Amino acid sequence: MTAFVQIGDTHFGATRETMFRNANPYDAAVRLVEAINRLPRRPDFVMHTGDLVDSPDEDAAYQLAQTVMSQLDCPVYYATGNHDRAAKLRQWMTFGAREDLAQDALFYRFAVAEHEFLVLDGRGPDEIDPEGVISAEQLAYLHAIPKTGRPLTIFVHYAVHPVGTDWLDNGMLLQNGLALHTALLPLRERLRGVFHGHLHQGMHVVRDGITYTCVQSGFRQFQFWRPNDDEVVDETIAAGFNWVDCANGQTVVRRFSTETHI
């Protein structure tokens, strides 16, 4: 069995006192790390699926994030969010063992036992933010992956498919999400899931036999269940994370809140 914890959208500021959307990201992240370290089982790794920091060019925010994230009692991996820079994540954050597949983008793979993991970089140029895009290089790599083999799990920051909320569907998705989905279709027999963040809410989308799982924010949740909303509305749900077990040909996702008694 392979088990990992998925977190995301922590939005660290440059100081412990920095506020964002009327909340304190540092305090929320400390509670998040403490909750994960209290779990009765130690995960094989923790995967942060992007938006580690809020301002992508503030070195102090990455430094503060590293101080907190280094307290996790297992290897940690990161995907590039629209609020992050791949180069800054490489510079300041400590990763678990990995094989880089690109020099500039944070596109890499790693393995745990018999399970393979692939991290895609969907961060596009600033002018398309907060939308993302998967590069032609990454799509070509996906198309070349053998259809059969060891279990495979994929991580990316951005949502791939529409979820029925105007503000999200019209400006927050991968611009070429359909191209990514098409590249993944031949891998369905190997694929244990696609895990992402960006939506600040926990949810699943199943399309053509592939499950896309979004983790709740480690900081602040958004409402997006009202179809006609045209702007972001904050939710009162607590920060949280996913515990994911991959074994016996299935994937089990358990959602936890930082307020859950562990």
Image (cartoon, grey):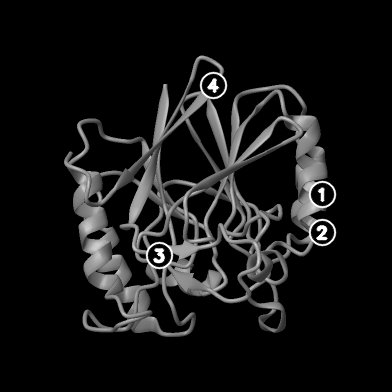
The answer to which of marks 4 and 2 sits earlier in the sequence is 2
Q: Position of residue 254 (x, y in %)?
A: 39, 35
The answer to which of marks 1 and 3 sits earlier in the sequence is 1
Label 2 CA crowd tier, 10 Å (few <14, some 14–19, many 20+): few
**Residue that mark 1 sits on:** 140
The answer to which of marks 3 and 4 sits earlier in the sequence is 3
Label 4 CA crowd tier, 10 Å (few <14, some 14–19, many 20+): few
State left or right for residue 18 relative to residue 168.
left
**Residue that mark 3 sits on:** 235
Figure quadrant of residue 135: bottom right
Which quadrant is the C terminus positioned in?
top left
**Residue that mark 4 sits on:** 250
Q: Amino acid at mark 1?
A: Ala
**Residue that mark 2 sits on:** 136
Camera-nearest label, 1 or 3:
3
* Secondary element at tag 1: helix
State left or right for residue 153 relative to residue 25.
right
Camera-nearest label, 4 or 2:
4
